[in-house]
Image (cartoon, helix red, strand yellow):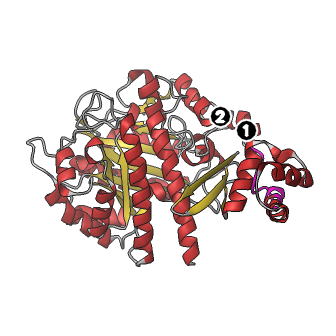
Amino acid sequence: MIHQYKNNGYNIVLDVNSGSVHVVDDIVYDMIACIDEHHFESEDKETVKEKLCGYLSYEKDVISEAVDEIFELKEADMLFSEDIYEKSVEAFMNRQTVVKALCLHIAHDCNLACKYCFAEEGEYHGRRALMSFEVGKKALDFLVANSGSRVNLEVDFFGGEPLMNWQVVKDLVAYGRSLEEPNHKKFRFTLTTNGVLLDDEILEFANKEMSNVVLSIDGRKEVHDHMRPFRGGQGSYDMIVPKFQKVAESRNQMDYYVRGTFTHHNLDFAADVCHLADLGFKQISVEPVVAQPTDDYALKDEDIPQILAEYDKLAKELIERRKAGKGVNFFHFMVDLSGGPCVYKRLSGCGSGTEYLAVTPWGDFYPCHQFVGQEEFLLGNVDTGITNTKVRDDFKSCNVYSKEKCKNCFAKFYCSGGCAANSYNFHGNIHDAYDLGCELQRKRVECAIMIKAALAEEE
């Protein structure tokens, strides 16, 4: 499968199956397009040269030289390569899985009232509650017991707002550390926070124990305060910005990221990314809101052209900043063209429902945080383990080949089929795909590859 596009003056050809990327001149670009359109790639080289002369107006020797280059790449499996993954998808679906990550809902409560919160201000379709040490302890025991021979395990302290249950966070980190040596495991703890309760003591602990810290901020003050106010309506921007800047500097601008959400109200979100960069943040993620069409802040189909143009604008801006020595990492434009994720990741993504589970304050297991409170997805709990194997097996079989919309999509090995929760919430089926999200993902992949091409010129 071939995907071709032009962006910021570059002619880019992506060989989807191999992941090879080629920046080519107009002649080669046109020839690859013609070969792909008419399925000439299976012909021998001389036949292809002959046929192209009938379709393209280039001189015969120009066509001959370009076809030689194209076939060199084809013979090296870097162009028109075969899909090696589809043949092994059945074995992949029958693979032995282990649990490697937990999202601990330390607090089903929050001190903010973010308008787009899928957790309903921390309640998750249920009741406000804080996780006890005993429940968290059982969750960590479950993770160790069900992780097989895997050494590295991940635990994210999530909410609501996890700092509202800070002592339990600290106690669970200490307990996790006590499990490492006797069980030959290593915990990687992360913390997601809105920053309201962040102080020096918490920061010192986080810098010692947390491999990553996610800081929630939407960008410009007016944007952030509109969507992320306190329950009384006051904005939270002025309180959290100095704290977040301190976090970033104290971690040497590594192992954290500021994470925002853009909505229908700020389709010019490139300005929010640039604002965060100007505040001194080097690790930035600003993601599209996922909301029902009835929400006034929801992204709409008619917003798509503006959003796509905004990604192009942002990509160019980030290139200029990098060239000026002021580079930042934008999460959605980060792509590894040299190797990338393993085959399992390429086919199934985050591993929700199998390798990755969310744990409620009372110890129930769900496939991920976005399914919490939807009882049809309840998998079990910390006392019984996984009992709803039907749901687990459904997630296990979910991959880019089980989704009709993914089969001919050039971005499938970058997004791995997209978010199962978004698919379910919009189509009632985890084997579908969230269409608006797919449009944006494809554009982000194109921008990410273009950035790589532009920066490669500078090296």
- The residue identified by callout 2 is 401
User: Residue 43: horizontal and vertical position, in percent?
Assistant: 88, 47
Q: Residue at x 53, y 71 (%)?
A: 455
State which quarter of the image contains the C terminus: bottom right
* Quarter of the rendering occupied by the N terminus: top right
Q: Is residue 67 above or below residue 425?
A: below
Q: Which mark is residue 86?
A: 1
Residue contact at pointers 2 and 1, CB within 8 angstroms = yes
Which portion, as a residue range, is magenta? 71-83
**In-image side of 75 versus 406 (left or right):** right
Between residue 404 and residue 145, name the one nearer to us. 404
Give whichever of 440, 122 is nearer the camera. Answer: 440
Magenta span contains residue 82: yes
Dominant secondary-structure state across the stretch colored magenta: loop
* Residue 278 lies in quadrant: bottom left
Q: Residue at x 22, y 57 (%)?
A: 220
- Spatial CA span between label 2 and label 1: 7 Å
Q: Report the residue at 55% width, 31% height from top.
A: 395
Residue type beneath disc 1: Glu
Let me know if residue 81 appears in the view: no
What amino acid type should be assigned to the residue bearing mark 2?
Tyr
Q: Give the residue displayed 49% in from the left and 43% down from the top.
A: 143
Above-or-below relation of 96 to 198: above
Q: Residues within 10 Å of mark 2 (few under 14, many from 20)?
A: many
Determine whether 392 is above or below 408 in the image: above
Secondary structure of the residue carrying tag 1 is helix
Element class at badge 2: loop
